[in-house]
Amino acid sequence: MPFVSQIQRQSDYNRFSSSTPIVIDNGASYFRIGWAGETDPRVIFRNIVQRPRHKSTGETVTIVGDHDPALLKNFDCTRSGPRSAFDNDVVYQFEIMEYILDFAFDRLGANGSQIDHPVLITECVCNPVHSRAKMAELLFETYGVPAIAYGVDAAFSYKYNQRHGICHKDGFAICPGFSTTHFIPFLDGEPVYKGCCRTNIGGYHVTDYLKQLLSLKYPYHMARLTWEKVEDLKMEHCYVAPDYASEARLFQEGTKEADDKIRSWQLPWTPPPAEERPSEEERARKAAIKERQGQRLREMAEAKRSSRINELENELHGLEFLLQQLEQVEGDNVPSFLKTTGYVSKQEIESSISKVTQSLRKAKGEPKSDLAETDEKTDSSANEKYPLVNIPDNLLSPEQLKEKRRQLFLKTTSDGRQRAKQKRFEVELERERKSQQDEERRLENPKLYLEQLHAKYKEISVRVEQRKRLKTNGGHTNGNNASGGVGRGERLNAAQRERMRLLTTAAFDRGKGEDTFGAKDEDWQLYKLMSKDNDDDDEGQDDEEAEMNRISSRLQELDPSFIPKPDLGTLQPAADMPKFRPHTKEDYQIVLGVERFRCPEILFHPNLIGIDQAGLDEMAGVSIRRLPSRCEELENRLTSSILMTGGSCLLPGMAERLEAGIRMIRPCGSPINVVRALDPVLDAWRGASVYASALHFPEQTFSRLDYYEKGEDWLRRYQLQYTL
């Protein structure tokens, strides 16, 4: 297909003789090229160039005009964005202009060594001679064109619409272009350049302003707000307000009329899958599976318990048999017998028997009274194991006193372990009793039981949260210290403050003499007071947190809709806690309200974006004051035929607003008529095409011979005559 299209372009190019001019509308936004005498240009593309690198090969390619996003996925465009050859509608980057002309002539079918056709190219009003000379140098020396003619795009559009009766010979042409706006008076069909004026505001600034407003309003959708898409939104939704202040007041008051003017652009959005609550059958099925799993776990626990009981019974029988054999051994052979068994003394064997017996009774779930008997046996064996503990100190020698301290330390440690085991056993029994009671209450009335659990969980969680908040804020509940910005002493309870006092005193006493801490028993009592384990407030808090966690686990088992609270220890302040919610369709909508008329308003008030220049309506008065000869009749003829051309004229309400603005600066009763061109975008090229097809067009060109003989300075005096 590309080869066939290339042949077609070449055949179209060969159909025209060398005297047929090529017409180029070199706009800052779009480039249009075609043959003189035709109604539409052959090639239209954006007047930009981009040179990205291929991601795999690293080769730099040149992309002219509009680009395909799917194509650019294979290129790295981070270092090379779209570039234009224009600066305020004046060509100054001729390296980029050469890429654009190469692309345009190739698409037109002229791919030979030179272009054997005259060229008519448009330019802005009062184009600098340097830019015009560089363009002539590029066309003459690079492409070898025989002749060049320069013309103003707005003048071609005015002449084209004059031929169709849209405007008169005397009038104004206002052309809000891509980056500038020109106001040109016409007398007898010829532009009066001494009376024209220009302001550096155009369609580019409107699009850029809209892009900035939408990016600030929707920062999470900036990737979708590309230049091309914002340009489409501008042309589709923006309009010029008849009265900017009253229009803004409507949106500020939020009236129904303002709501009717709001437009929205829906971005691609896929709704999340709806979470349906499980049916009764599904919940019954899950409950049955959970019951089977629980039954299997109970069977495994029972098997493990039976195995443990068998192991303990075998171990107890072996120890009892060993003790019987030890009683039959004579006194001299006892050490050698004990050495073979691995035990040191008879007391150690008896202690092992008591431990195994206690573990066995605990595994069998025997009552507490049996454990008390075991404790009595343990106490009697302990008295035999530590014989010096109950003997007064005055009856003992120094060596026996040391041994008594050692036995006292060992006995205290052993008693502590026994008490801890007893406490754990009691806690487990109490937990089992509570679980059994809870299960009985649940079976009696499941609904009431679940409500009571929720209420209890809420009550305990509130208490825990208040305690932690008070601990963080030092007891201040008036909200003035929400950030916890209080002293360390204010955040401590009584036990913690006493511990800090003892630590400070001990640290102060150090260094005054020999460090003898620990030599006396009182030092170890002081060490216990310094320990954090004596903080009763923390222990109470841990008990409540444990109870809350137990209730939370129970609720998760019984109520699938229950959601436990996050860890209160890492709870953030309410102001800083992030709020998460699922995205909705409205989150993916770009709503255009006041932006619809706020952005085009900069054409009439450029100071809204910091440009201190005249607006479109003020330019009429400036242009009238610059006319060489002024009279009321001439001014009335000019204002009675004002033609709007250019892409920004397509915004709705432009003609009415411009007419109202010009009426404010003209005398009362002055005739004012603002009309829009037949096609504000293509009329400039069509007018140039009609002009280039006229018989007298060759007389208006600047030939290559003139360029070599007269030089660039002659272009300063070159001026196209629009009346032939």
Image (cartoon, helix red, strand yellow):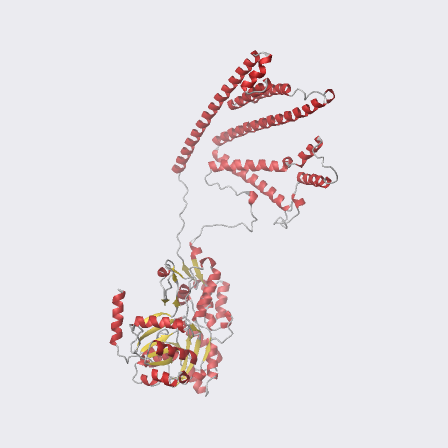
Instruction: Left or right? Give the position of 241 relative to 543.
Output: left
In this view of the protein, which residue sits in the foreground, 262 or 155? 155
Percent position (x, y) of residue 668?
47, 82
- Specify the quadrant that holds the N terminus: bottom left
Percent position (x, y) of residue 262?
44, 63
Residue 126 shows in this picture: no
Instruction: Left or right? Give the position of 356 relative to 528.
Output: left
**Total labels drawn:** 0
In this view of the protein, which residue sits in the foreground, 61 or 82? 61
Instruction: State the image quarter where residue 165 is shown.
Output: bottom left
- Specify the quadrant that holds the C terminus: bottom left
Q: Is residue 724 above or below residue 555?
A: below
Q: Is residue 466 above or below residue 15?
A: above
Percent position (x, y) of residue 85?
41, 72
Residue 353 shows in this picture: yes
Instruction: State the image quarter where residue 29 is shown.
Output: bottom left
Q: Is residue 574 above or below residue 721?
A: above
Q: Is residue 460 above or below residue 616?
A: above
Percent position (x, y) of residue 369?
58, 20
Instruction: Left or right? Give the position of 456 relative to 393.
Output: left
In this view of the protein, which residue sits in the foreground, 159 or 147? 147
